[in-house]
Amino acid sequence: DTAVSQTPKYLVTQMGNDKSIKCEQNLGHDTMYWYKQDSKKFLKIMFSYNNKELIINETVPNRFSPKSPDKAHLNLHINSLELGDSAVYFCASSPLPAGSGNTIYFGEGSWLTVV
Amino acid sequence: SQQGEEDPQALSIQEGENATMNCSYKTSINNLQWYRQNSGRGLVHLILIRSNEREKHSGRLRVTLDTSKKSSSLLITASRAADTASYFCATRHLNAGGTSYGKLTFGQGTILTVHP
């Protein structure tokens, strides 16, 4: 019954590798997000998609590429991983992207460690 | 930066006591939300307060908003050990045209520890 599910939960990989994190939501929401939480707990938005269209693209290295095959899925692919990419990545969704009253539903996070 | 700032960064109290956490922000907002994050888990929405509201209640939670001071507070009354978590405020800001951005900006959070 998980509303926003992301896999894998833990990922340890070497520098230079390419990896993907997958996310799916079964809430019927139109908007999905990727957030990054660093070691100091700051949570920053990376991308947002609405009905498969990119609507928010923060200053994120080109090595990060989101892909939304349909509005229920938003995957994150990371090329040439660097040590600084180590963080917790959260997928999230909301009914609509803008306007008041939209709360965000988060997945459980994917712990990425680059060694 | 539009990012909200929570204060204190960490709070340690005994069960039964009240816990108050504060959030300050810099630019006009459409609404402010509080989220909770248990260790090793995702964030869970607690309560939303709109810019034209001053106070809101939900169970043991009370949220206030002072737009003139650009600040909000979250009060948890009669705290329990299970309330131990990080608490984040998140703001949805208005752009120059007075409409709302599509993104929610989070602060660094307050780590609350409630001792049994």
Image (spheres, helix red, strand yellow):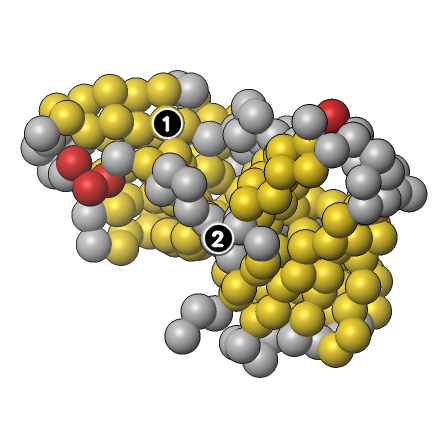
Could you tell me which chain the residue with mark 2 belongs to?
A: A
Identify which residue is drawn at 19% across, 48% down: B60
Query: How many numbered circles are shown?
Result: 2
Q: Nearer the viewer, residue B19 or B36?
A: B36
Image coordinates of residue B29 in percent, x first then y, are 61, 45
State the CA–CA distance, disc 2 to disc 1. Answer: 18 Å
Q: Residues within 10 Å of mark 2 (few under 14, many from 20)?
A: many
Residue A27 placement, left or right of A46: left
Task: For the residues labelled 2 and 1, say whether their Cβ atoms are less than 8 Å apart.
Answer: no
Residue type, numbered disc 1? Ile
Q: Which mark is residue A51?
A: none
Q: Is residue B115 above or below residue B37?
A: above
Which residue is labeled 1 in the image? B111
Point out the image quarter for the N terminus of chain B.
top right
Residue type, numbered disc 2? Glu
Q: Secondary structure at mark 2?
A: loop
Q: Residues within 10 Å of mark 1 (few under 14, many from 20)?
A: many
In which quadrant of the rendered view does residue B87 lie? top left
Residue B60 placement, left or right of B11: left
Q: Is residue B16 above or below residue A48?
A: above
Point out the image quarter for the C terminus of chain B.
top left
Q: Which mark is residue A108?
A: 2
* Residue B17 visible in the displayed image: yes
Dot 2 and dot 1 within a common chain: no
Q: Is residue B82 above or below residue A9?
A: above
* Residue A59 visible in the displayed image: no
